[in-house]
Structure formats: C-alpha cells, structure tokens
C-alpha cells in the first residue's frame, strides 16, 4: 500500500485567480497537494471547485498566478502534454471500443508496444475485477462497471496526477458507497495523486487524506476531514460540513479551564474550547447534534432544560428537535441503542446535556 508523501508537493497553486469576463470564479487561491495524496475539493455548486480542476488540467487558462506540477510551471503546457488525466462524471468511454480497447487506448497513444499494452490492460482490469468483461462494449456494462472501466482507463497510462470531477454523482446511493471504498483502495494501490471534486461531504470525509472546503471562489479551510469537522475555521465551513447548531453567545466569565458563556436565551454553558475574546464580547458557538445527549432526567451539571418538539426515527439514530425554556431551538441526534426514543413523547420535559468540550467558539467576524 502506498502512503501519502508530505515532503513532495505534486500540485501547487500560487496566488491563482480565474476570471470569466467581470466574474471572478477563483480568488487568490493558495494550495499545496502532496504526492500520493487523496485530496478533495469540496463545496456547493458554483463555488469554483471544477474551475480549479480545469485550471490544473489545462482546460482553462489562469488569469493570474501560477499552477505548478512537481515544481514545474504549467503556464505554457497544453493539456495533452501535462502528466495528468481526468475522469468525468459521464464516464466518456468510447462506445465503439471494447473495455480492453478503452483501457489500452492511452497506453497505446504513449507509444507502448503491443505486449506492454496487453500486460497493462490485464493488470488494470484485474485491479477493478473486470477481466471477464474485457471484450464487452460499454453499453453492455452496468453504471458501476462503466465507472470502474473509466477509472482504470485514466490510470493505465500512469499519470502522475488523476483529476476526478464528481465521478460518482450519476450512480445510485448504494453503488456510490461501494465505489468510495474501491476508489480509495485504487488510489492507495497505485500511489497516484488523486484530486477529487464533490459537493457530497460524506463522500469527502470517507475517502480523503485532506479536504479543501470552497465557497464563492475562495478556499476557506484545508485539512484532514476530522479536523475540518471538529474544528471548522468559520461559519461557512461549519454550516457546510455536517449538521450543526450555531448559537449566538456572550462571554460571561473566563477561567484557566475555559469560559462560561451566556446563550441567546439567557441560559449558560461551559466551554473548554479556546475563546480568544474577553468577558462581555460576543460570538457564536457551534454544537454538533450528535454531541448532545437527550435525557428524561438530568444526570449532568451541563444540562439545558427543554421541551421535546419532535422526534424522528431514522433507523440508526433518532433526530430530536428541542426548545429550551428560553425559546432556543436545538437539534440533537442519538444512536438507537435502546428504546429511549419511544419513551420520550412530543411535548415532554427533557434535558439536553452538552459537555464543555463539545462546544466550539466562533468569533463574530468568522
């Protein structure tokens, strides 16, 4: 298995700006993507992630700044001369060729001998369990099989970087989930740097070594999925990654162990996260729904008294909507390990228990 090399930068963006007329699609992007890394560009539609991918591929020209590949400026290098390949969401397999011919196409174009091409095709098809389908046409394969064929066709010529533009979006949910595992394994086995574009946060979290969250052409935060989820830099990231409760708060008191915060409804909570502002100053707190424990009885000193507004059973967990005595709305999610959800009826009094370490502080200006 290959491992991420954090000493070699595969792709580097330096002050990259991309404009389409008066519209700025990418704003002063700085980014370093390491060799052998599974890196994901994550964000909503129109945030600039596909444009960034196309700048790396050479399908779009940089308005300002530099795109570098393994230290080399790509400014004057056309797409066909860049050691990168792209996998699109529509597969783009040649319909008149067999799967084996599709996979071997890029290898043949690089001047490989017939014997070398045959060995590469066999190895690639074995890698994605398509050996028995080598002589079929793309139309004879399922969507998942076509996607696997498109992936190894792009990998077969041994590009140094593989660009993937929402390649799983056309698949159904179960197939997407299965392909995530296969895609990650494929990246680890080949050691190729993958740069993956998606708007699906679960997809990004399940596969990536690191993630760049984008919004309005700006790279908001870069880091491992756990870091971005647990410690979002600002409200934009917090809102996009996972469900969240964002609540206004004022610093009531500070001590060596953290701070006491007054929430919008006047209730108080303890916070052990770094609160870089003084007493009386305001900001927002982030509380993930799964960090809130809902109980019919209070068993912690960190509880907010609430009424249960609704409980929605979701199979693996239950989603609760709570109203505090002061009128604040909270969403909580708890795993269904017993029948607790069935014992708490709508309108009943409950306690939302929130440990101090579960509360994250966000400054007003973030």
Image: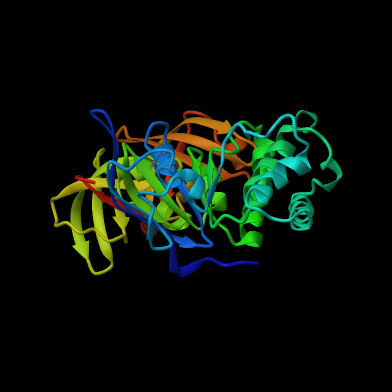
Residue lying at 67% horizontally and 45% vertically, measured from the top left: 153
Rendering coords of residue 200 (x, y %): 51, 39
Residue 243 lies, with reference to residue 189, above or below; the image says: above
Q: Splitting the image into 4 quarters, where does residue 357 fall?
A: bottom left
In the image, is residue 341 above or below residue 23?
below
Q: Is residue 212 above or below residue 20?
A: below
The percent position of residue 282, horizontal first and vertical second, equals 18, 47
Instruction: Say if 193 sits above or below 139 in the image.
Output: below
Front in this rendered view, residue 7 or 61: 61
Q: Is residue 284 left or right of residue 103?
A: left
Give the residue drawn at x 43%, y 62%: 70
Question: Count of labels shown?
Answer: 0
Depth check, front residue: 102 or 246: 102
In the rendered view, how is the structure colored?
Answer: rainbow
The reply, left or right, for residue 94 in relation to residue 239 is: right
Quarter of the image where one finds residue 355: bottom left
Is residue 248 among what the camera can see? yes
Q: Is residue 155 left or right of residue 27?
A: right
The image position of residue 294, as x and y in percent, is 49, 44
């Amino acid at each position: 298995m290959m491992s991420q090399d954090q000493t070699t930068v595969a792709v580097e963006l330096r002050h990259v700006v991309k404009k389409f007329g008066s519209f700025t699609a990418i704003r002063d992007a700085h980014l370093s993507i390491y060799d052998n890394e599974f890196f994901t560009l994550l964000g909503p539609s129109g945030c600039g992630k596909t444009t960034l991918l196309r700048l790396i591929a050479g399908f779009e020209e940089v308005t300002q700044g530099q795109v570098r590949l393994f230290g080399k400026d790509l400014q004057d290098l056309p797409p066909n001369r860049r050691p990168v390949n792209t996998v699109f969401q529509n597969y783009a397999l040649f319909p008149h060729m067999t799967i084996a011919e599709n996979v071997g196409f890029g290898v043949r174009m690089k001047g490989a001998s017939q014997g070398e091409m045959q060995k590469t095709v066999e190895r690639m098809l074995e890698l994605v369990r398509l050996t028995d389908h080598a002589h079929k046409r793309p139309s004879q394969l399922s969507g998942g099989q076509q996607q696997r064929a498109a992936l190894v066709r792009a990998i077969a010529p041994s590009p140094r970087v593989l660009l993937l533009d929402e390649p799983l979006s056309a698949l159904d949910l179960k197939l997407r989930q299965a392909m995530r595992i296969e895609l990650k394994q494929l990246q680890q086995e080949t050691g190729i740097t993958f740069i993956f574009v998606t708007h699906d946060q679960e997809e990004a979290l399940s596969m990536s070594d690191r993630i760049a969250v984008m919004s309005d052409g700006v790279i908001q935060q870069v880091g491992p999925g756990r870091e971005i989820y647990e410690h979002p830099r600002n409200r934009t990231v917090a809102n996009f990654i996972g469900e969240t409760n964002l609540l206004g708060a004022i610093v009531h008191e500070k001590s060596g162990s953290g701070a006491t915060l007054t929430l919008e409804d006047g209730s108080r909570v303890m916070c052990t996260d770094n609160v870089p502002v003084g007493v009386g100053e305001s900001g927002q707190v982030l509380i993930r729904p799964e960090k809130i424990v809902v109980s019919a009885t209070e068993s912690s000193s960190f509880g907010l008294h609430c009424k249960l507004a609704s409980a929605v059973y979701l199979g693996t967990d239950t989603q609760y909507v709570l109203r505090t005595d002061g009128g604040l709305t909270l969403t909580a999610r708890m795993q269904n390990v017993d029948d607790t959800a069935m014992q708490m009826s709508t309108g009943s009094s409950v306690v939302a228990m929130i440990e101090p370490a579960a509360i994250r502080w966000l400054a007003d200006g973030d």
